[in-house]
Image: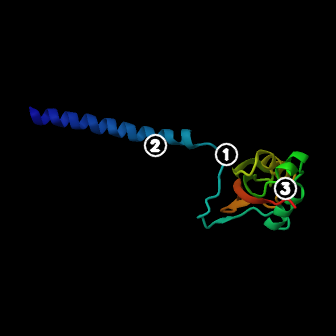
Amino acid sequence: MNLSKSNAIRNRRLFLFTICVLGVILLSPVFTGCKSKAVVINPSDLNQTQPVYPGGTDSLLMYVARHIEFTPYMNEIDATGKILIRFIVEKDGRITNPEIQRSLEKYYDEAAIKSLMSAPRFIKPAFHSGVPVRSYYVIPVKIMLE
């Protein structure tokens, strides 16, 4: 009697386990079937290329440095240092979502972001396995008043 009862319990558990596994297998395409996914490049991946700015990264740094508009208040503060800005290069080369990673002073940070956002698009986005993807990019902006 005990053997048949334990076999019945084991059969019920096996049946429930099988139903759960089938449910996961059948429903997984529903939850993972999104056609568009945002992919951010992992630096350790070998099938990738970085975005390309016209003239290279040095050209982007020079553009941002040249186009920062200094206000009289910023000249009074006389701050020097480095601002780190992280942003996303979209699939079409646009610059979006700038974030200050290392701040110097609020007004300098805002001026650096404004200058960056006025920069021309990247001529080539990042590629992952031959497909254009969004990617993060970080630049340092040096502030030195003379």
Query: Which of the two marks, 2 or 1, is nearer to us in this view?
Result: 1
Q: Distance between the residues labelled 3 and 1?
A: 23 Å
Query: Which of the two marks, 3 or 2, is nearer to us in this view?
Result: 3
Mark 3 residue crowding within 10 angstroms, few (<14) / some (14–19) / many (20+): some
Q: Distance between the residues labelled 2 and 1?
A: 21 Å
* Foreground of the two, 118 or 46: 118
The local secondary structure at tag 1 comes to: loop
- First-in-chain label (2 vs 1): 2
Mark 1 residue crowding within 10 angstroms, few (<14) / some (14–19) / many (20+): few
The answer to whether the residues at label 3 and label 1 have Cβ atoms under 8 Å apart is no
Q: Residue 140 at what x, y percent from top left?
A: 74, 60
Q: Name the residue under label 3.
A: 121
Tag of residue 36 = 1
Looking at the picture, which amino acid does disc 1 mark? Ser
* Foreground of the two, 33 or 146: 146
- First-in-chain label (3 vs 2): 2
Looking at the picture, which amino acid does disc 3 mark? Arg
The answer to whether the residues at label 2 and label 1 have Cβ atoms under 8 Å apart is no
Q: Is residue 125 in sight in this rendering?
A: no
Looking at the picture, which amino acid does disc 2 mark? Ile
* Foreground of the two, 104 or 40: 104
- How many marks are shown on the rendered structure? 3
* Foreground of the two, 140 or 119: 140
- The quarter in which the N terminus is drawn is top left
User: Which corner quadrant of the image does residue 44 belong to?
Assistant: bottom right
User: Which corner quadrant of the image does residue 49 belong to?
Assistant: bottom right
Query: Which of the two marks, 3 or 1, is nearer to us in this view?
Result: 3
Q: Name the residue under label 2.
A: 25
Mark 2 residue crowding within 10 angstroms, few (<14) / some (14–19) / many (20+): few
Q: Residue 3 at what x, y percent from top left?
A: 11, 37
The local secondary structure at tag 3 comes to: loop
